[in-house]
Amino acid sequence: SSELTQDPAVSVALGQTVRITCQGDSLSDYYTSWYQQKPGQAPVVVLYGKYNRPSGIPDRFSGSSSGNTASLTITGAQAEDGADYYCASRDRSGDHVVFGGGTKLTVL
Amino acid sequence: QVQLQESGPGLVKTSETLSLTCTVSGGSISTFYWSWIRQPPGKGLQYIGYISYTGITYYHPSLKSRVTISVDKSRNQFSLRLTSVTAADTAIYYCARGLNRGQQMPYYWGQGALVAVS
């Protein structure tokens, strides 16, 4: 089982706002990265470090955290945002990377 | 532009050794953290391990007895070796690099290589 817990599936109406969460004991100590993965493709980082967006990632993607929960928010979800989203952070010892189980986002 | 490309056999026999190579362009292999991640069909991502720019390695506890990650500086490549494979090792294997020196979190990813164990 993963040290980071995500809801398996979330849906959002086109143009609405959706929050995808990630829970884990280590998240209060380390930054969380978020990856988007579309079918047949490698994961792409959408947020890293302290809520940084790589160039090319729309500003509708944002991050936040509170205690042991990190969140990825998509404000005004688009059809192309439908994908699997994975959170990642350090494990409790800080030694290595751990991934959440992933959340499948459906844009209705 | 940073690019990573996995290569290796797409089919490995049960009990044999899986070997993959990641060829790096757009950056020196002597810097950064270099990671391997895998994804069984239809499942989530699993972090296999890394090798740092100082040669330090980390392996996931569940794989530690079977996995080796190494670097070939002359070819700007790093490699994954997984011994005694079973069907449970069937997965897409990704190589990845951190954004900056000292950052372990995967930022740049290869396109992935599907390895089937049969």
Image: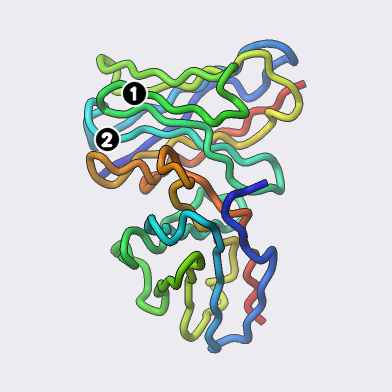
What is the secondary structure assignment of the residue under circle 1?
loop
| Label 2 crowd (10 A; few <14 / some 14-19 / many >=20) | many
Residue tagged 2:
B32
Mark 2 vs mark 1: in front: 1
Residues at discs 2 and 1 in contact (Cβ within 8 Å): no
Q: Residues at marks 2 and 1, common chain?
A: yes
Q: Nearer the viewer, residue B57 or B21?
A: B57
Give the residue displayed 35% in from the left and 41% down from the top. Answer: B104
Q: Position of residue B89 (x, y in %)?
A: 68, 28
Amino acid type, label 1: Ile
Amino acid type, label 2: Phe
Upstream in the sequence, badge 2 or badge 1? 2
Residue A104 versus residue B63 in the image, above or below: below
Q: Position of residue B97 (x, y in %)?
A: 35, 39
What is the secondary structure assignment of the residue under circle 2?
loop
Q: Nearer the viewer, residue B48 or B116?
A: B48
Q: How is the image coloured?
A: rainbow
Q: Chain of mark 1?
A: B
Give the residue displayed 60% in from the left and 37% down from the top. Answer: B92
Question: Residue A6 is drawn in which quadrant?
Answer: bottom right
Question: Residue A46 is drawn in which quadrant?
Answer: bottom left
Q: Position of residue A32 (x, y in %)?
A: 42, 59
Report the number of numbered marks.
Answer: 2
* Disc marking residue A93: none
Residue A108 versus residue A49 in the image, above or below: below
Rendered-image quadrant of the C terminus of chain A: bottom right
Q: Position of residue A58 (x, y in %)?
A: 37, 74
Give the residue displayed 57% in from the left and 58% down from the top. Answer: A38
| Label 1 crowd (10 A; few <14 / some 14-19 / many >=20) | few
Residue tagged 1:
B56
Residue B93 versus residue B10 in the image, above or below: below
